[in-house]
Amino acid sequence: MTLPKPGPHCKARTKNGKRCRAATTEGGLCFFHANPNKASELGRIGGRSKRYKTDENADPLPSLHTATAIRDAVARLIADVYAGKVHPKIAAGIAPLMSLQLQAIETADLERRLASVEKLVAKADANEMPEEGLEDTAPMQPTSTDTKT
């Protein structure tokens, strides 16, 4: 089985010096080599149409000082992506930041709880200390009646 012969190719060269493989127009060049400014013009139009548009009336970002607030913000972010209000790439950039904020909140909460426990332990230790002027309570030595022989 033989393959059909390819049609005529553009006579121009690409930036890397190879021959352009696009189909030719009447002048022997492809459309973009015959109209060099057209490629950049079409690229600009395509770029503008795909650009993410921000909504001026978007809801402001809520305060993210609690784990519950972050959970609610993540739920809203998922809903906004699903509804097309937020581009998935934007959400993908925000998600790790929210995760980092959640870890910071959890760490701060653990530090606060640990400080509270340490205060309670210190207070309990202070209450168990003998008052000044009392004898030092040394461990009692076993007597002969306490031990089994």
Image (cartoon, rainbow, N blue to C red):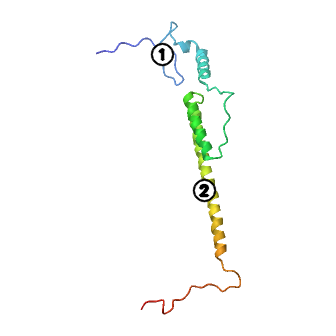
* Residue 80 spot, x, y in % from top left: 58, 31
* Residue with the mark numbered 2: 110
Q: Residue at x 50, y 14 (%)?
A: 11
Label annotation for residue 22? 1
Q: Is residue 65 above or below residue 128?
A: above
- Classify 10 Å Cα crowding around label 1: few (below 14), some (14-19), many (20 and above): some
Give the structural element (helix, strand or loop) at label 1.
Answer: loop
Q: Residue at x 61, y 43 (%)?
A: 70
Q: Is residue 76 above or below residue 53?
A: below
Quarter in which the N terminus is drawn: top left
Quarter in which the C terminus is drawn: bottom left
**Residue 3 or 119: which is nearer the viewer?**
119
**Residue 52 or 6: which is nearer the viewer?**
52
Label annotation for residue 14? none
Give the structural element (helix, strand or loop) at label 2.
Answer: helix
**Residue 27 or 135: which is nearer the viewer?**
135
Q: Earlier in the sequence, mark 2 or mark 1?
A: 1
Look at label 2 and name its amino acid: Leu
Quadrant position of residue 93: top right
Q: Residue at x 60, y 22 (%)?
A: 47
Q: Residue at x 66, y 65 (%)?
A: 119
* Residue 91 spot, x, y in % from top left: 58, 35
